[in-house]
Image (cartoon, grey):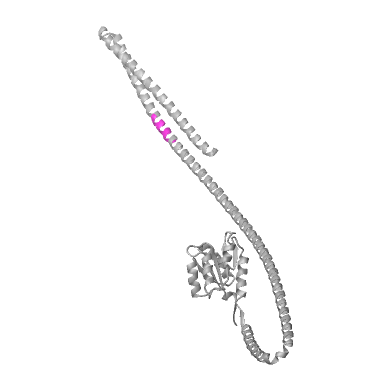
Amino acid sequence: MNELLTWPLAAVAVAVVLFLLWLGRRRQQKSRADARRREAERLTLARAEYATRAPRVPAESARQQADDQALREVEAAVSQRLGQQRAEEEQLEAERARVEHEEALRFEAQARRLAEQRAETQRREADEQAAREAAEAAEAERLAQERAEAERLAQEAAAREAEARRLADLKAQQEAEAERQAREQAAREAAELQRLEDERAAREAEALRLAAEQAEAERLAAARRRAEEQAAREAAEAAAAAAAALATRELRADETLVLVADDSKIVRVKISRLLTGQTYRVALAESGEQALELMAAELPHLLITDVEMPGIDGFELTRQVRAAAVTADLPVVMITSSDDKQAEAAAAGVTQLLGKPYSEEALIAAIERARLAVRVPA
C-alpha cells in the first residue's frame, strides 16, 4: 500500500518541478522583452526630440552635424544591441526548446518507469493475493473434508449404537416370546395329561359297568360287535390321518403369502421391504375392495390391514373375510393408532391388534405364528 502511494507522489513532485522551471523561463523572457521595449521607446523619444528641435537649429551649424552624427551612432548602437538581443533571445529560445525537449523525454522515461514499477507491484500483489486465496480455499476444503469425515464417523457410531439397541430389544423380545411359548406349551401338556387321566378314569368306569352288566351279554353282544366294527373303522381313519400327517411339512417362509391392505403408499412400501427382507411373499392392496379381489385370485396365509381406509375399512374387510368359508380361518393382523379399538376388533374377528408405533419384531412374530400353523404336503 505504501509503495502504491509513493510512485504517484513522486510523479506529482516531478510535475511541480517542471512547472516551476517553465514559470522561471517565462519570467526571464518577459523581463528581456520589457527591456527591449523600453530601449525602443527611448530611441523613439530621442528621434522625436531631434525632429522637433531640428527646424530651430541652422542646418549648417556644426552642432547640428555633431548631434546628427551622435544620433546616428546611437541608432547604430541601439540597432546592434537589438540585433544582439534578438540573437541571444533566439539562442535562448533554442536552448529552452532543447531543455524542454530533454526534460520532456526524462519526464516521459520516468513516468514510463513509474508505470512499469506500479504494474509490476500490482502484478506481484495480485499473485500474492491469488496465492493467499488458493491457500485459504485449500484450507477451507480440508476443513470441510475433516468435518464431513467427522460427521460420517458420528453417524456410523450412532447407527451402530442404534443397531445394538435394536438387537438387544429383539433379543429381549425373542426371550420373552420363548418364555411365553414355553409357558403355553407347559399349560397344553398339563391339559393333555389331565384329559388322558380323565379318559383313563372313564375307561375304568366303563369296564366296571360292563362287568356289572355281564348278565346281559347276549343283548350287548351285538352292540359290542357293532362297537368293535366302529372302533376298527375309527382306527383305520386314525391310521389314515396319522399317515397323512406324516406326509405333510411346515410352510416355508418363501412360500408364505402375506396380503397388506393400507391406503398409505409409504406404509405399504415400508412393510413390503420388511417382509421381502425376511423372504416372505408379499401382495399389496391400497383398499379393502382390492384386497378382496387379490384374495379371490390367490388365497394368502395372513392378512395385514389398516383400520381406516376409503370404501371398505379394516373392520368391514375382516367381517367379510370371516363370512366367507374359504377365508374364515385366515389370520388377520390389524394395525391401528387408537387404543380403544380392542372391543370392535374382537367383534369383527381380528386375530391380533397392533398399535402404532409397533415393533417390526412383533409383526414378524405374528406372521411366524400364522406360518407355523399351516401344514402343506411334503
Task: Name the residue located 41 percent from the left edge and 30 percent from the top edge.
Answer: 96
Residue 100 is one of the magenta-drawn residues: yes
Residue 364 is one of the magenta-drawn residues: no
Q: What is the chief secondary structure element of the magenta stretch? A: helix
Task: Name the residue located 57 percent from the left edge and 66 percent from the top edge.
Answer: 347
Q: Is residue 153 above or below residue 208?
A: above
State the image coordinates of residue 270 (x, y, percent, origin top left).
55, 64
Asked whether 227 or 276 is in front, the reply is 227
State the image coordinates of residue 74 (x, y, percent, origin top left).
34, 16
Work out whether residue 73 can be spotted: no
Asked whether 49 or 245 is in front, the reply is 245
> Within the image, what quadrant is residue 164 found in?
bottom right
State the image coordinates of residue 2 (x, y, percent, origin top left).
55, 38
Residue at the extreme front: 215
User: Which stretch did the figure color magenta?
Assistant: 93-102
- Compared across the picture, whether 338 is left or right of 78 comes to right
- Compared across the picture, whether 117 is left or right of 215 comes to left
Q: Is residue 32 above or below residue 367?
A: above
Asked whether 16 or 60 is in front, the reply is 16
State the image coordinates of residue 156 (x, y, percent, origin top left).
63, 60
- Compared across the picture, whether 38 is left or right of 149 comes to left
Task: Name the residue located 39 percent from the left edge and 23 percent from the top edge.
Answer: 30
Task: Name the residue located 43 percent from the left edge and 33 percent from the top edge.
Answer: 99
- Quarter holding the N terminus is top right
